[in-house]
């Protein structure tokens, strides 16, 4: 029952369809790059890039939006970094060791 309200809202605000189109194209390009990354370098590299992107996003958030730095951010940051490291290590293929 909300489709008619959404259509009338889009008609009354002419920028909405343009924003939806731009967002759709941006998402398509992002997914295409991610799949190309997987195809070219493998899943582990893609997960590493995605994890690093998340860390950079958080760091830029701190830089762009000033927040008071508290001591609580240190252990939380260490937990995030250790989670990323464990995620990357878990996705690496296990090496088979030959017994002599």
Image (spheres, rainbow, N blue to C red):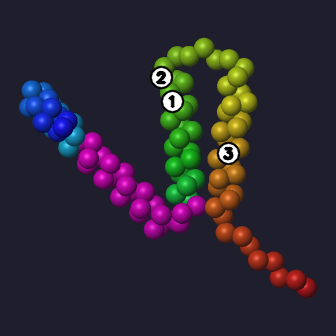
| Residue for point 43% across, 57% down | 34
Q: Does the magenta portion include 88? A: no
Question: Mark 2 and 1 residues: CB-CB less than 8 Å, in contact?
Answer: yes
Q: What residue did someone put label 2 on? A: 64
Figure check: 37 above or below 54: below
81 up-or-down from 89: above or below: above
Residue 18 visible? The answer is no
Q: Quick one: which residue is furthest to the bottom in this view?
A: 100
Residue in the picture at 69% in, 57% down = 89
Q: Position of residue 18 (x, y in %)?
A: 16, 38
Numbered mark located on residue 83 in the image: 3
Q: Which badge, 1 or 3, comes first in the chain's sequence?
A: 1
Residue in front for this viewpoint, 66 or 90: 90
Mark 3 touches mark 2? (CB < 8 Å): no
Position above or below: 70 against 99? above
Q: Residue at x 46, y 61 (%)?
A: 37
Q: Earlier in the sequence, mark 3 or mark 2?
A: 2
Q: Position of residue 23 (x, y in %)?
A: 27, 42
Question: Dot 2 surroundings within 10 Å: few (below 14), some, or many (20 or more)?
Answer: few
- Is most of the magenta stretch helix, strand or loop? helix
Magenta residues span 22-44
Disc 3/disc 2 C-alpha distance (Å): 25 Å
For the residue labelled by badge 2, is the local secondary structure a helix, a strand or a loop? Answer: helix
Q: Which quarter shows the N terminus?
A: top left
Q: Is residue 46 left or right of residue 87?
A: left
**Residue indicated by mark 1:** 60
Query: Could you classify mark 3 by the number of other residues whose Cα lies within 10 Å: few (under 14), some (14-19), or many (20 or more)?
Result: few
Above or below for 3 versus 72: below
What secondary structure is marked by label 1?
helix
The picture places residue 48, in percent across and down from the top left corner, at: 58, 53
């Amino acid at each position: 029952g909300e489709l008619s309200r959404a259509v009338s809202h889009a008609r009354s605000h002419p920028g909405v369809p343009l924003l939806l189109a731009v967002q759709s194209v941006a998402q398509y390009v992002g997914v295409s790059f991610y799949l190309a990354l997987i195809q070219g370098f493998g899943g582990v590299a893609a997960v590493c890039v995605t994890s690093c992107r998340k860390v950079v996003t958080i760091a830029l958030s701190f830089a762009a939006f000033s927040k008071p730095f508290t001591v609580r951010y240190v252990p939380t940051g260490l937990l995030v970094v250790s989670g990323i490291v464990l995620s990357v290590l878990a996705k690496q293929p296990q090496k088979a060791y030959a017994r002599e």
